[in-house]
Amino acid sequence: MHIKKPFWLQKKLNLSVQSEVLKIIRNYNLHTVCSEARCPNISECFARKNATFLILGDVCTRNCSFCNVKKGKPSTPDENEPIRIAGAVDLMGLSHVVITSPTRDDLPDGGAIFFKRTVEEIKKRKSSVIVELLIPDFAGNERSLETIVFSGADIVGHNIETVKRLYFLRKGADYKRSISVIRKLRELSPSLKIKSALMLGLGEEKEEVEETLIDLLDAGCRYLTLGQYLQPSLSHFPVKEYIVPSDFEYYKKKAFSIGFIYVESSPYARSSYKAGNYL
């Protein structure tokens, strides 16, 4: 059954403010998760010349029920993509940039080396740029995680996305494996800034959310995002509940009380939305 959006979820897209960033992205032949995932904050972020770059193409090898990124057989990675990303970051004058990718189970290292090369190219042009990596689970490959930890990135995120009971929505993923990814990042670098995110409104219970926050904290995550799941299309998993703003505030206070350092918790919060604020 379709649930009508509440009044606090009526953000409008403004295509006119997106043109300059879109032009840069197209000129450099790049992808952004902002466009591919149909992020509701795209107008606001593009107006500030912010974008989350999607490396390794725009096709994912998995089939999550809530995600709008295309599914199928990806193309061969473009060896020059890290250089083009660095050029776009430089042209946009970004001081904080987020780099993510679709899951690439077809690659031996899941694409970890491309994350590393992208960080290196960005830092080569301007070492002061804060680079945040939002990584897939790399099928739990520890060597891939080592590549990420020692890439030179300033902050690394891996999104848990939802509670353990609802992991059937993440085809090919595993809750314990995602927690272990965060734990391994912490073991490899005790000082690394580690981030994660959950979507709410998929049918989770409040107690399950709180249990997930504890699991993340115990694994070594200290930066957290909580946002409302919005169904990208009628073919995607439906919204089960629109979480009221007061509940987002409750989760924020709860997360701080148990030890998180920085928390964004609101209906439109996304893992890369206002990412520069976290540090």
Image (tube, rainbow, N blue to C red):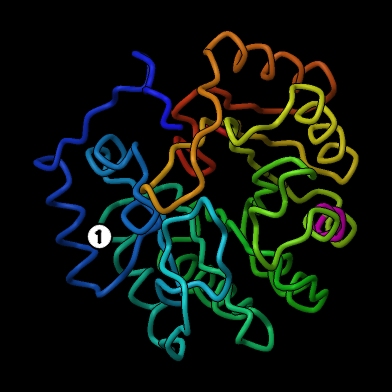
Residue wearing tag 1: 91
**Quadrant assignment, res 3:** top left
Residue at the spot 59% in from the left edge and 74% down from the top edge: 116
Residue 149 seen from this side: yes
Residue at the spot 76% in from the left edge and 51% down from the top edge: 192
Q: Is residue 100 above or below residue 145?
A: above
| Amino acid tagged 1 | Leu
Q: Residues within 10 Å of mark 1 (few under 14, many from 20)?
A: few
Q: Nearer the viewer, residue 10 or 144?
A: 10
Q: Nearer the viewer, residue 43 or 90?
A: 43
In the current view of this chain or complex, which residue is farthest to the front? 1
Q: Is residue 73 above or below residue 65?
A: below
Residue at the spot 31% in from the left edge and 55% down from the top edge: 35
Is 112 left or right of 140, judged from the image as shown? left
Residue 112 % position (x, y): 63, 76
Residue 43 % position (x, y): 24, 38
In the current view of this chain or complex, which residue is farthest to the top? 246
Is 221 left or right of 157, judged from the image as shown? right
What type of secondary structure mainly makes up the magenta span? helix
Q: Is residue 50 above or below residue 259?
A: below
Q: Nearer the viewer, residue 40 or 172?
A: 172
Residue 247 % position (x, y): 62, 13
Residue 179 % position (x, y): 82, 52
Q: Which span is picked out in magenta?
A: 179-185
Is 153 left or right of 99, judged from the image as shown? right
Q: Nearer the viewer, residue 10 or 124?
A: 10
Residue at the spot 45% in from the left edge and 35% down from the top edge: 274
Q: Secondary structure at mark 1?
A: helix
**Quadrant assignment, res 23:** bottom left
Q: Quadrant of the C terminus?
A: top right
Residue 276 seen from this side: no
